[in-house]
Amino acid sequence: MQTLIQSVLALQNGHLQSLDVLLDGQYIHTVAPAGTLSASPDCQTIQAISGQDKLLLPGFVNGHTHSSQVWQRGLIPQLPLELWLANVFESTPRQLEQFYWGAVSTAVDTLLSGGTCLLDHAYLIPGQELETIDALVRGYKAVGIRAVIAPLIQDLPFASGFPAGCLLSQAASPRSAAQLLALMETIIAEFHDPDQSIYIGLGPTGFHRCSDQLLQGCADLSQQYQLCYHMHLLETRAQQRLAQERYGISAVQHLHNLGCLGSRTSLAHGVWINNQDIDLLATCSTTLVHNPVSNLRLGSGLAPILQCVQAGLNVSFGCDGAASNDAQNLLEAIKLGTILHTVTDSDYEHWLTPEQAIVMATIGGAKGVNLSDRTGAITAGMEADLVLYNLNHPSLLPRTNPLQLLVLGRPTEVVEAVWIRGRQIVDQGRVLTVDTHTLHRALRQHPANSEAAQTHHHLVEAHYRQVMLRS
């Protein structure tokens, strides 16, 4: 089947142009000036779409989220990450059905805010790890989104993630590094399925709760299977202090020494990286995933995004999970991530433009999930992951600069159509693959345990205040 989108505005080489775009099966077949294309004469099935008053962009990538946190949206009070995490663990869902609907909800929200791909740094139910992955895969396949599932694994106890954590009581360690790596090989063999838009990634939570053996083992598996390698990095000042306490050097330098940094590596947050870290990450062709909403919600700080861009480091955007964002809206994350950093550099020539932000969300995002050879650009031969925006929607009027209104405005319900691998998933703003009324009914039927997440005075709070606020 062919789809011809005629005379549509599209961003090409940094400029908006009016184009004809022909899709053939799952691929972009031809991109040409407006009014010059027609369907191939030997094609029996053709869908022609007028691009008049429309904007066509590659799909955004949500480079870092935790889908199960949909159930913790609006649940956890404003706390710094280390205390927030204690509440997250206590209120994490425990039913496989919740993980399925969490994936469906995250996918739908991603689609309707311009995304065609996401990376789920996925929590797993202890003792039901394979069943959890199966629930996530079923959810993402039902929607039809492109999904990278990177199971969140660690082999050090919770207390080890705090500076001077050795002073805290230590719970029994989770599974050993060897056991977790064996589990990951099983998950890769069973669930990695690029032909169905499902990819498995390696997802150690971060250096703060992972041994060197686990970090290196994940890097080895990433190399062996050519998979994305994803983790949190220096999200908070506490993690920066922990790295110095544990290694005596930067966490970035330590990861480099272990062989964990490369072109398939993406690192979430990076709020506390320094200039030397930035240069090293750029040299390694690593991606930094910027999560501005979460970073502010948890008081983690402002990531040095302008310095990263100036150094040539690939930067993409993420929503992070709904427990630290309370939404899954990529346009919101992109807007905040674009304007937030004007306060960090008085030289306005360094500020991010809407065009740069779009490139970061598309090409940068695709690189961050190890899919830049398949998606991220409107180019012949690429897989057709595309989003069509309605420029006649009131939130994109008056007709000034469509990209600036999309990135810096408050666009709502502007996604008209979405294609993933050439398959139309959204039409007239409606998801075609799943019944959103059924989704919303499922979300209503599983109320969150609000009492479990309102514990301000967790056992670790006194230690955190002593180490981070009084020392």
Image (cartoon, rainbow, N blue to C red):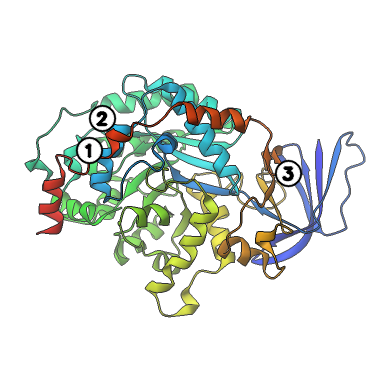
- Whether residue 311 is visible, yes or no, is no
Q: Which residue is mark 1?
A: 211
Q: Nearer the viewer, residue 249 or 129?
A: 129
Task: Give the secondary structure at mark 2.
Answer: helix
Marks 1 and 2: CB-CB under 8 Å?
Answer: yes
Residue 420: image x %, image y %? 65, 40
Local crowd size for mark 3, using a 10 Å CA cut-off: few (<14), some (14–19), many (≥20): some
Task: Give the secondary structure at mark 3.
Answer: loop
Question: Number of numbered discs present?
Answer: 3
- Whether residue 265 is visible, yes or no, is yes
Q: Nearer the viewer, residue 468 or 174?
A: 468
Considering every residue shown, the one lying at the far bottom of the view is 347
Local crowd size for mark 1, using a 10 Å CA cut-off: few (<14), some (14–19), many (≥20): some
Q: Which residue is mark 2?
A: 177
- Whichever of labels 2 and 3 marks the residue nearer the N terminus, that label is 2
The answer to whether 252 appears left or right of 423 in the picture is: left
Residue 466: image x %, image y %? 10, 53
User: What amino acid type should be assigned to the residue bearing mark 1?
Assistant: Ser
Q: Residue at x 49, y 37 (%)?
A: 148
Q: Residue at x 20, y 37 (%)?
A: 158
Q: Which numbered marker is on residue 428? A: 3
Residue 410: image x %, image y %? 58, 60
**Picture quadrant of residue 159:** top left
Task: Give the secondary structure at mark 1.
Answer: loop
User: What amino acid type should be assigned to the residue bearing mark 2?
Assistant: Ala
Marks 2 and 3: CB-CB under 8 Å?
Answer: no
